[in-house]
Image (cartoon, rainbow, N blue to C red):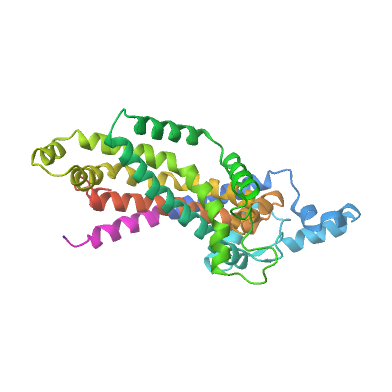
Amino acid sequence: MSPLPWGPMARLAGRRTLFAAPVLLVVTFGMFAIAAASPFDPVRAYAGTAALGADRATLDRLRANLGVDQPFAERWWHWLTSALTGDLGQSSVMRQPVAEVLGERLVWSTLLCAVAFVAAVLTGTALGVLAARRQGGWLDRTVTSLAYTLSAAPVFWTALLAIWLFALRLDLLPAGGLTDTASEQVTAGQVASHLVLPAGVLAVSQLPWFTLYVRQGVADALAEDPVRGARARGLSESTVLLGHALRSGLLPVLTLIGSRVPELITGALLVESVFSWPGIAAATVEAATAVDFPLLAALTALATVAVLAGNLLADLLYGLFDPRVKLSDM
């Protein structure tokens, strides 16, 4: 096996990092501009019902304390220069530093997305291979029909259906949360049982794309001359399918890794909200409705970094596994 091309990989990662910097600047600046144009008042959202009886002077002082009395461009620049030093600011809606909000919630969102993504890739690959093995057969028609149906199903609808069936009707799995209601500590067993439904629903939302891509890729590979030659040499069907066709058929799937990251993030926000999963979904919703500039900016930058990292990972995998693609040309 040839050694990994660390040099081209590092150069590609360096170029993408340089490209990511202006993208993050534009995205965060746009977020501050949109938030400034929002009809929501962060001061009244912060003060709650107390703002109803407060006079103008009190609200102005509170506005100055929260740092929202300045033009949005100045607020953005202050946030950016502070973020470069590691200070992400104070969340007005969470009443704690933004770094703590992200630290407490990001691990659970990462766990949910990672488990769902791995499950979707493995299950989608298996179903795609089975469907491509007998094109036009009953299994192929069943798998493709199911995939197209699931691709049209809204994530929140699938989540509610899963709760009704597995939690309420069959009483097999908990309906939401991270641990049992009466539990005083977080245990791995409780987290695993509470993770099944949200991760399963999120995986189902990504499953159709991997299934259809693998099916098409493997079907095309089975019609290529190298695979036909392998069959002519008397190799077993499983060797031809898994050792030759699947290897070529998985190449288009690598491009999905980057393109599905935004959908994965969006789906995770909906799934976390439905299942009361303690990730960043609740923080995102609260930050948006309260116009919490520091938290909104951090969450927006985090989502942008995730999308850019997904695209970079897809390109690196494609360059490593496809001999026709050179990392130096990407």
* Quadrant of the frame with the N terminus: bottom left
203 within the magenta span? no
Considering depth in this image, is 122 or 324 the residue closer to the camera? 122
Can I make out residue 257 in this image?
Answer: yes
- Percent of width and height locating residue 272: 60, 52
Region in magenta: 2-19
Res 100 → quadrant = bottom right
From the viewer's perspective, is 257 left or right of 320? right
Residue lying farthest bottom?
185
Q: Give the vertical position of 189 relative to 159 (above or below).
A: below
The residue under the point 56% across, 59% down is: 193
Residue lying farthest front?
170
From the viewer's perspective, is 170 left or right of 66? left
Can I make out residue 214 in this image?
Answer: no
Considering depth in this image, is 304 or 216 the residue closer to the camera? 216
Considering depth in this image, is 210 or 284 the residue closer to the camera? 210
From the viewer's perspective, is 173 left or right of 247? right
The residue under the point 59% across, 53% down is: 172
Q: Give the vertical position of 65 relative to 253 (above or below).
A: below
Q: Give the vertical position of 229 relative to 81 (above or below).
A: above
- Percent of width and height locating residue 150: 49, 36
- State whether the magenta stretch is mostly helix, strand or loop: helix
13 within the magenta span? yes
- Percent of width and height locating residue 280: 60, 57
